[in-house]
Image (spheres, rainbow, N blue to C red):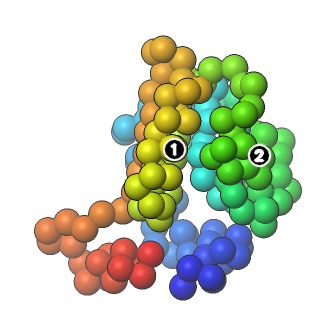
Amino acid sequence: MRFLLSIPSLYTYFQEIVGGHKARLAYLENWVCAKEGSRVLDIGCGPGEMVTYFPSCEYTGIDVSEAYIRKANAAYGDKGTFYCYSIDQAFQQDWEPFDLVHCTGVLHHVPDDLARDIARLAAHFLKPEGYFCTLDGCFADGQSFLARTMLKLD
């Protein structure tokens, strides 16, 4: 399953069939509440679709997958800037502080030490009044069989 989702077009299709678009829109509208003109850093931006969910902003996306970054630049390069960086490479950048550091569907895939590095990266690049948002799947009481199965496969 993980190999298939490493292919940008299959990842995008999978997100559509499991309701990813609707969930992301609700998450960004109800919880993130990014404002127009915000500076946004998206850690683990994947193929870049998240840029379309934000109001007009200065968007920077990073991901370790060259294939995802190629797709992001081809599809959304006019809406944001995308880099194939590891967390260590991102720390070395001379970026102005961000209003929002965003990380969707990443933390549950990485070991605890890398999750801590991601949180440190967020803190490093945030403005004093900025904030860090993340959205990851989790197991919950009353969850459907399909939802639990998808989480286990993920």
Instruction: Say what secondary structure mark 2 lies in.
Output: strand
Q: Vertical placement of 23 versus 134: above or below?
A: below
Whichever of callouts 1 and 2 sits on the residue coming sooner in the sequence is 2
The residue sitting at 50% across, 52% down in the picture is: 114
- Horizontally, residue 107 falls left or right of residue 8, namely left
* Residue 154 visible in the picture: yes
The residue sitting at 70% across, 76% down in the picture is: 7
* Residue 61 visible in the picture: no
Q: Amino acid at mark 2?
A: Phe
The residue sitting at 55% across, 27% down in the picture is: 124
Instruction: Say what secondary structure mark 1 lies in.
Output: helix
Q: Which residue is mark 1?
A: 118
- Pick the front one: 124 or 81: 124
The residue sitting at 48% across, 14% down in the picture is: 128
Q: Vertical placement of 2 versus 96: above or below?
A: below
- Horizontally, residue 116 falls left or right of residue 1, namely left
Q: Position of residue 61 (x, y in %)?
A: 68, 44
Q: Amino acid at mark 1?
A: Ile
- Horizontally, residue 10 falls left or right of residue 122, namely right
Position of the N terminus, as image quadrant, is bottom right
Task: Mark 1: give few (<14), some (14-19) or many (20+) Cα within 10 Å.
Answer: many
Q: Position of residue 82 (x, y in %)?
A: 77, 46
Of labels 1 and 2, the one closer to you: 1
Structural distance between the alpha carbons of marks 1 and 2: 17 Å
Q: Which residue is mark 2?
A: 82
Q: Vertical placement of 47 versus 139: above or below?
A: above
- Pick the front one: 11 or 125: 125
Position of the C terminus, as image quadrant, is bottom left
Q: Position of residue 64 (x, y in %)?
A: 69, 58
